[in-house]
Amino acid sequence: MTVAYSYLLFIVLGIFLFCYFIATRVWIKVDEKNKKLDPDKGSKNRRDFLYLSSITVGGVGVAAFMWPFLKSMNPAEDTLALGTTEVDLSNISIGQSITVKWRGRPVFIRRRTQEEITEANSVEVASLRDPMEDKDRVQQEEWLVMEGVCTHLGCVPLGQKMSDTKGEYNGWFCPCHGSHYDTSGRVRKGPAPDNLPIPPYKFISDTKIIIG
Ligand code: FES
């Protein structure tokens, strides 16, 4: 239990007890008045009030007791931070790729050339094994962000380094069993069943993204 939480708890309980005390005093006054007029009604009202107020006090106590346990069930801020990766794109030049880690997995970020973008858009989408338009795989056509994990058996495809072989479709090539991916990361040949997956990400500025 944090110090801040303890203070908050004391303040809330203090306010509640103060209100409870005032309400009791008011109720007793009203009850005394009723008792003079009708003795039976007065005692019934007092019983109802005590019953109701006991439940309320008990409810507040249970809520105050449960709060830290419920709160501890939410992921901590440092845990949430581990689930995201912020990437500065400003040093990546056209035609260059970098690999970053997100949740322990490699994520490929490529700043595509105009030729690569044109190539990705000139494909007959219906003919693809995992049909997907290039525009549905990117948020800005220059930037391709995708998980670098082959969808066959999970090898990391080649194509990130300038010197790497990029396969028959000028994108990425998985050397494990020979899957070829195009400049949009879509599977074009080999045993991989699906395109390279696109992770959740968003641009937080012109040159920065957050993955996750
Ligand atoms: S793991 Fe990539 S082709 Fe088999």
Image: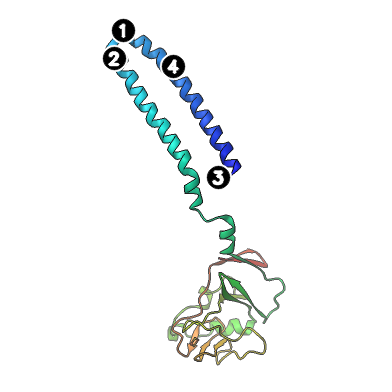
Residue 125 sits above or below residue 88 on the image = below
- Give the class, few, some or many, for how many residues have Cα within 10 Å of label 1's Cα (few <14, many ≥20): few
The image quarter containing residue 49 is top left
For residue 94, side relative to residue 140 (left or right):
right
Which residue in the structure is indicated by mark 2?
A: 41
Q: Amino acid at mark 3?
A: Met
Cα–Cα span, label 3 and label 2: 46 Å
- Numbered disc 1: secondary structure: helix
Residue that sits furthest to the front in the current view:
1
Q: Which mark is residue 37?
A: 1
- Numbered disc 2: secondary structure: helix
Residue 29: image location, x then y, percent: 41, 12
Seen from the viewer's position, the closer of residues 145 and 133 is: 145
The numbered mark, 4 or 2, whose residue comes first in the sequence reads 4
The quarter of the rendered structure image containing the N terminus is top right
Residue 106: image location, x then y, percent: 58, 76
Q: Amino acid at mark 2?
A: Lys
Seen from the viewer's position, the closer of residues 199 and 144 is: 199
Which residue in the structure is indicated by mark 4?
A: 26
Residue 149: image location, x then y, percent: 53, 80
Cα–Cα span, label 1 and label 2: 9 Å
The numbered mark, 3 or 4, whose residue comes first in the sequence reads 3
The numbered mark, 3 or 2, whose residue comes first in the sequence reads 3
Which residue in the structure is indicated by mark 3?
A: 1
